[in-house]
Amino acid sequence: MLTIESSQAPLLGLSLDELTTWVQERGQPSYRGKQLYQWIYQKGSKSLGEITVFPKQWRETVANVSIGRSTIHYRSVAPDKTVKYLLKLADNNIIETVGIPTEKRLTVCVSSQVGCPMACDFCATGKGGFVRNLETHEIIDQVLTVQEDFGRRVSHIVFMGMGEPLLNTKNVVAAIKSLNQDVGIGQRMITVSTVGIPQQIRDFAGYQLQVTLAVSLHASNQKLREKLIPSADHYPLEKLIADCREYVNKTGRRVSFEYILLAGFNDKPEHAIELATHLRGFQSHVNLIPYNPISEVDYQRPTSPQINTFMKALKERHIAVSVRYSRGLEADAACGQLRASQVNASQN
């Protein structure tokens, strides 16, 4: 009599050794572990039934075991070839993922949570509330989905999608290690973005990863930052910067600071001068990001002269700085916009 195995934790995210143990526990020879590993990470199998090198009878016994792949719920392509995806998870929650191609790179912007609890005033994701953390396999799946859809290797990953990665550190770190060891993406090609959570930057440094830490600063003083980021009242700017300095000392890795320029709010020369005083004297880099307007708030995008003046003020004070222009502006560019627009459309 054929016994069908009941569903268990998804296989995506398990190492070669773990998959080998898994097949052996089910009566299969050890070499099946390597086959399973290759079909999951290299061939992109979405179910065990697809793995034709396995005996048909055994495939039937493990048919209910999930590999852990999502389905593409919606796909939006911008004129610059940036692709935004809405991915449907096993529990029917929807997350956003973005594939950003250039001639030499393919970057994936991944989400770490369904929604986000930080409620930043300028962010579309924060307006939608928080549902749950993503599991390790749900993070890895986003990268494999983009890689398969583009038909080319992913070279870079940025944790700048939905959610706060350092509120889901366990699964984010596990995903980074698997993406590095199993998918083959160098840790130095991975960036983890955080708005700043007390103690978490110091804890994250303890993992001794070779990733880039990007801190969403967005303001040059505590008062402005609290207006943009509700959680900032629990994490003074001076303490945040001190933790970033400690991160550099512990890891030897430079910290990037994300700074969204909001016209008339935080983009004046005096803000640039104030920002420079905080960042003097340690390895850092400022990414200036001209704001992408969303319907829920009235912030505006600064003009090119305003952006250039701000950047010049930082450069004059020997702060490494560049401007990062968003890709896919015609495709609900701001994180959370595509998901929100599709949810609203389905309710109408």
Image: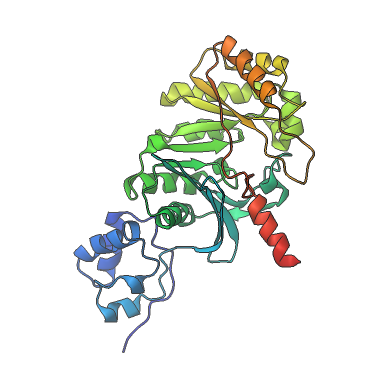
- Quarter of the image holding residue 94? bottom right
For image coordinates 38% across by 55% down, the residue present is: 151
From the viewer's perspective, is 123 left or right of 40?
right
Q: Viewed as shown, does residue 134 lie left or right of 28?
A: right
Q: Nearer the viewer, residue 137 or 321?
A: 321
Residue 277 position in % (x across, y down)? 63, 13
* Camera-nearest residue between 185 and 18: 185
The residue lying furthest to the bottom in this view is 1
Residue at 76% over, 25% down: 223
Vertical arrangement, residue 205 with respect to residue 70, above or below:
above
Q: Position of residue 269 (x, y in %)?
A: 70, 16
In the rendered view, tell whether residue 42 sits above or below residue 63.
Answer: above
Residue for point 38% across, 45% down: 177
Residue 252 position by quadrant: top left
Q: In the picture shown, does residue 221 fall above or below 178?
A: above
- Residue 45 figure quarter: bottom left
Question: In the image, is 194 to the left or to the right of 3?
Answer: right
The tally of labels here is 0
Front position in the image: 166 or 109:
109
Q: Position of residue 80 (x, y in %)?
A: 53, 45
Seen as rendered, the residue at the extreme right is 298
Q: Quadrant of the N terminus?
A: bottom left
How was the colour assigned to the protein in this rendering?
rainbow
| Quadrant location, the C terminus | bottom right
The percent position of residue 108, horizontal first and vertical second, equals 47, 46
Q: Residue furthest front?
A: 79
